[in-house]
Image (cartoon, grey):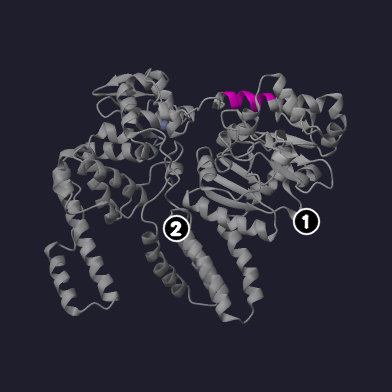
Amino acid sequence: MPAWNGERVPKFSEQFIQQVAQATDIIDLVSQYVALKKRGAEYAGLCPFHNDKNPSMYVSPAKQIFKCFSCGAGGGVFKFVELHERLSFPEAVRHLAERAHIPLPRDVEAPVPDGTPTKQDLHRLTAFAADYFHRTLLSPAGRETLEYAHSRGLTDESIQRFCIGYAPEFWDALLQAAGREGFGQQALLAAGLVAPRDQDRGGGCYDRFRNRLIFPIYDIGGNVIAFGGRALAANERAKYLNSPEGPLYDKGANLFGLNWARQAISDKEQAVVVEGYMDCVIPQQAGVGNVVANLGTALTDRQVKLLGRYAKEVVLVYDADAAGEAATDRALEMFLAQQLHVRVARIPDGKDPCDYTLAHGGEAMQALIDQAPDALEYAWRRRQGELEAAGDNLAKRRAIVEDFLRLVVSSSAFGAIDEVRRGQLAQHIAHVLNLPAGEVQQHMRRMGRAIPRANPLPGDAQTARTSPRHLPPAPGTNPTYLAQRHILESLLNAPDLFDSVVEQVGPVDFDDPALRWVAQEVWNRGSRGHLAVEELVACEVLAELGALVADMIDAGHRRGNHEQTLRGAVEFMTYRRDRQNMQDLKATGMSDDVLRQIGKRCQKADPRRKPMAGGS
Ligand SMILES: [Zn+2]
């Protein structure tokens, strides 16, 4: 399973974030984009995140939140900017800091020791290098390479658009050209464009990319951050060579082609992930605009999260070899954890997306993408082959089935598949294994109970769920879920009540990952004696969950009766927890004496009691 923690690198201090939030008035901010009209204590306007005909977005100056009653978008000031400008959280903080004329903290800008090139210097250098390679390709020196590029199917238009270039076969062509523009060796080294020569060979540097077709790699803002080079000589050891990681290039956080594909991905709500430069460029050139490449490395959590900002669904198009299969399995788990729907396309005849598109055209490639099976179905088909291969080896067969069931169970735990689909899969598996369906489902339930404990806290999995096109999770009628929501809804509206519950429940009692995440933040702040809702919606973690938080604030506000609601929900939760503890103890063979003791505690609360709806 993917790591839940460790991905989030806070760029700004909480204090700075709150300073920016306080300096930004949500009414003032939203009015910049939307005409707002006063309605009682709130303001209403046309929601910019869906095709709104009647004003369905409400903005509350008191709580500093916005909420759309049609599409579910909602949150605080940072969330609004994130959605509207398509920025990450740190980018949104920076944006609003600049808007409020608050100077950025010094340590956010990379410290620059004397003589070390700044990030701006490096951006200027990489832009120069991309242009230099591109001009060289179009110059007489690049004629052969240009012919080669054409023979591989690249059109002049693509060469222009992707700024494809040629690094000539010299040790210092770029070094000299950049030197004439005033770029020093240190900058060239930092940008990964040159490599240091051994001291016994006279020191100095030499060009990293030689005799290669060059693909500049851009970040989402359109800055060149790295280069990929395809060998032109047949005997070259490395067919592809990429820039090393450095101050500009963080391999695991970028995807080739996203800067061009971003709009198409947003429009289709779908991203296609391929492995190589040409696999991305050639389909894009043929009209399949939503393709990005992960450059042959294993897909990282951060890349998946990045895609989640633009897409609801991802189609993986990897090589059909063993390495490709393993990569697909890993990617599958990551996407499931981020609640992105995944499908897996396979190209017939072992071709890659580039060859296939060239041979059959963009429409055929699009058809393959459209027909790609759902990832779970794909995973099952593959295991069916393994099952057949396992023959009568029961242990092997069991291992294969367990492996698949685990994937299904974790998918439903992450909300990636629903109960109905889960039941269908159980039927399907039961049929194949010639087992009663009930037995398979029972087994899956047993596995399911182990899974929530394996994932103590959710990471950024909720990003996809809270993007404007994703409605907040339905309140549902499950009493446990309701009780947990009621606790948070009441606390968000009546923070003073925190002290009355802190002893009785805690974040660990919340099963729903998103709710637990909110609870964690409420408890963190509440136990420091500082639970203020305006601050809560501005903090980084909850900005991600903006729609859910805004929804809970609103639902709680409309219900009112916070104290009573809270008391009912907490009682329900403690009863449920004690009962669960007793069951766990029974299962572990605890002594009857201990069980009786706990049993007594359970009797204090009425077992039929549901969380109070309040307001009656
Ligand atoms: Zn809306």
**The quadrant where residue 129 appears:** top right
Q: Dot 1 corresponds to which residue?
A: 349
Pointer 1 or 2: first along the chain: 1
Does 66 sit above or below residue 434?
A: above
Tell me the magenta residue range. 121-128
Q: Secondary structure at mark 1?
A: helix
Residue 203: percent from left, percent from top: 70, 36
Magenta-span inclusion, residue 127: yes
In this rendering, position of residue 541 left or right of residue 347: left
Q: Dot 2 corresponds to which residue?
A: 412
Report ligand 1 position as a quadrant: top left
**The quadrant where residue 470 appears:** top left
Comparing 551 with 149, the one in front is 149
- Label 2 beta carbon less than 8 Å to ligand 1: no
Does 322 sit above or below residue 74?
A: below
Comparing 166 with 430, the one in front is 166
Task: Residue type at mark 2: give it.
Answer: Ser
